[in-house]
Amino acid sequence: MIDIRTLFGQSGHFTFDPGFTATGSCVSGITYIDGANGRLTYRGYKIEELAEHSSFMEVCYLLLYEDLPSLHDLHMFEESVKKEMCVHAKLENMFSTFRDDAVPMAKMCTVIGSLSTFLVENDKRKWSQKEMEKLAISLIAKFATLAAMAHRTSLGQPIVKPRMDLSYTENLINMMFNDPDHPDKPPSPIHVKAMDKFLILHADHE
């Protein structure tokens, strides 16, 4: 990298880089991306290794706590996430106010913004580490539920609730693609594995 922080002060000029194609706008202690050479790491772990040997929940834990979890810690983390997957009925009702042809991402932007009114106290100014962890877990959990709601309602289909007997990724697939003729049938392991890899790849963006 070339450090140009003093460029404007010394010359009165800025750089011009449309699309930030040659600009590093920040430094991340979590993620390293080198798109030109196909490199991506989370906390120093190569994305190929994580996709092959870890689940999305393990990667979430890694991003939050700086290392991969033990089996016990992973179980406790997964249970904490699943317990937070239900959303307030008022958030669910928001989806009925959108136009039928509204795109799911537009719905997500609106509802995620509204989510802060349910998770954050209005007078909150300072956060403890435990409070930040709880909020992060709640966001991870509720994002899957809200994404599934955005998808289902865009198709005019009924909303499917999360289930405690399914994993996070199984829940996401079930809430999005549940078959009314076989409502209790768990998602295909092949689909779960593919979705898990997809979620791992997009878990963080530096």
Image (cartoon, helix red, strand yellow):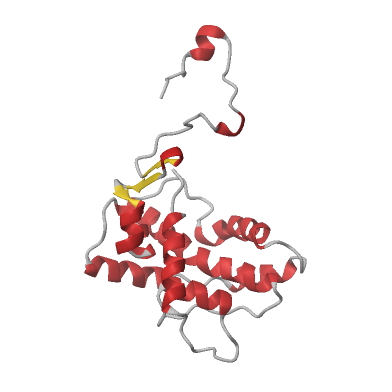
Residue drawn 33% across the image and 57% down it? 50
The quarter of the picture where residue 92 lies is bottom right
Residue 135 on image: x %, y %: 43, 58
Q: Total marks drawn?
A: 0
Residue drawn 50% across the image and 13% down it? 7
176 in relation to 4, above or below: below
Pick the quarter of the image with the N terminus: top left
Is residue 90 among the parts visible in the rendering? no
Residue 133 on image: x %, y %: 37, 56
6 in relation to 114, above or below: above
Residue drawn 42% across the image and 62% down it? 197
Seen from the viewer's position, the closer of residues 125 and 49 is: 49
127 in relation to 168, above or below: above
Residue drawn 50% across the image and 8% down it? 10
Pick the quarter of the image with the C terminus: top left
Seen from the viewer's position, the closer of residues 49 and 73 is: 49
Residue 127 on image: x %, y %: 40, 49
Is residue 25 among the parts visible in the rendering? yes
User: Hey, which residue is sitting farthest front in the picture?
Assistant: 37
